[in-house]
Image: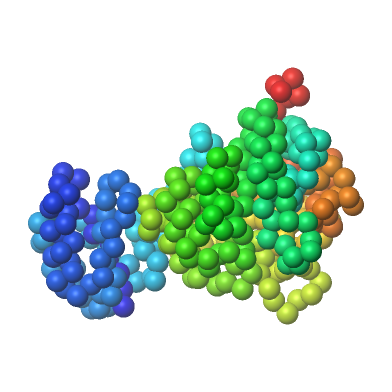
Amino acid sequence: MAGLVVIPDPAATPARLDALAEALGRFGFDVHRTGAVPVVLAATGVAADFDVRHIKVLDDVQDVVRITSPYKFAARTWHPADTVVDVDGLAVGGGELVVMAGPCSVEGVDQIETSAAAVAASGARVLRGGAFKPRSSPYSFQGMGEEGLQIMRAAADRWDLKVVTEVMSESQVEVVGRYAHVFQIGARNMQNFPLLQEVGRAGLPVLLKRGMSATIEEWLMSAEYVLAEGNPDVILCERGIRTFETATRNTLDLSAVPVVKQLSHLPIIVDPSHGVGIRDKVAPMAMAAVACGADGLMIETHPNPPEALSDGPQSLYLDAFAELMDGVRQLAGVVGRSVPEGAVAEAA
Ligand code: PEP
Ligand code: MN
């Protein structure tokens, strides 16, 4: 079964769009209407040999694109140019590498202020940090909740950083949305479809981590859930998958970067921190991610990793992060990218 994306004439009135959707339905297709403007109609359940000329001749049809993948809006066939996601004025997926850095968990004012100042000074543009943490054990630190969001947003604003933070459930979307610039969907929630639909409707960009046992196709189908709600701003994040290998926490699948670039127009960043789980392996894999075409990085840092309440063993010391950023800046030039200069201390 294939799918069709039908682009209506922009001048079509709502009533004429209804008529077009009905006409498509008469072919036996399931018709989905995106909330995006301009409205497009996606038809699924289309036989592989269906002749699209039947659709091209319908009233108010501007164009029809046949898509054979199980995802449509995420496919490069549907959108040949790279998508650049606008994060409150910050472009993700353009020529500039976007580095998102900060602690695994927001732990307190001093920790997050020190982190924000340091990562901004090194050229990161987005502050990461979890306030609602998906911990494997219910007895581990669960995060500071809304107070954590407040202090993270305040620290980020001081340094003109954007905030990316995880939202774990539909019921958290409203509160997280008040402080975040980007909703992070964690690996464990990649196939939480109602959550994906909710962030698809919430009006902020979404960073969609790859599930730890998800194929690339499943990952793109999850992106499709967000896109199909009319939210075009999805950033993919490769963070390692489970394999038989135990020497690293996960197996960082860097081959996903060029594969996704071919299959999809969405930007993709790499999180080597969760990918390898071991501090001294983070920098080499971050460099490798830039070399293979990632649009950015997500790196866990901590002012004092041995004391971190989560993921200390994979968190970079702040001086090591600064050193990594120097290397990334040099390599970026080689691969036709750039990294912004760090914020100067007086800018606070
Ligand atoms: C995190 O970013 O801290 C996190 C929990 O990541 P993941 O969902 O990739 O495990
Ligand atoms: Mn973490």
Q: Is residue 253 visible?
A: no
Q: Is residue 30 above or below residue 297?
A: below
Pick the quarter of the image with the C terminus. top right
Identify which residue, 60 or 22, lies in the foreground: 22
Q: Tell me: residue 142, above or below residue 179.
A: below
Q: Is residue 196 visible?
A: yes
In the rendered view, does 141 fall on the left or right side of 231? right
* 29 sits to left or right of 329: left
In the rendered image, the vertical position of residue 138 relative to residue 120, given as above or below: below
Question: Residue lying farthest right?
Answer: 306
Residue occupying image coordinates x 45% and y 48%: 202
Give coordinates of residue 49: x percent, y percent: 23, 78
Left or right: where 108 falls relative to 161: right
Q: Which residue is depicted at the point 67% across and 65% down?
A: 240
**Quarter occupied by the N terminus:** bottom left
Seen from the viewer's position, the closer of residues 315 and 137 is: 137
Residue closest to the eye, 342 or 157? 157
Q: Quadrant of residue 154?
A: top right
Q: Residue at x 88, y 50 (%)?
A: 307
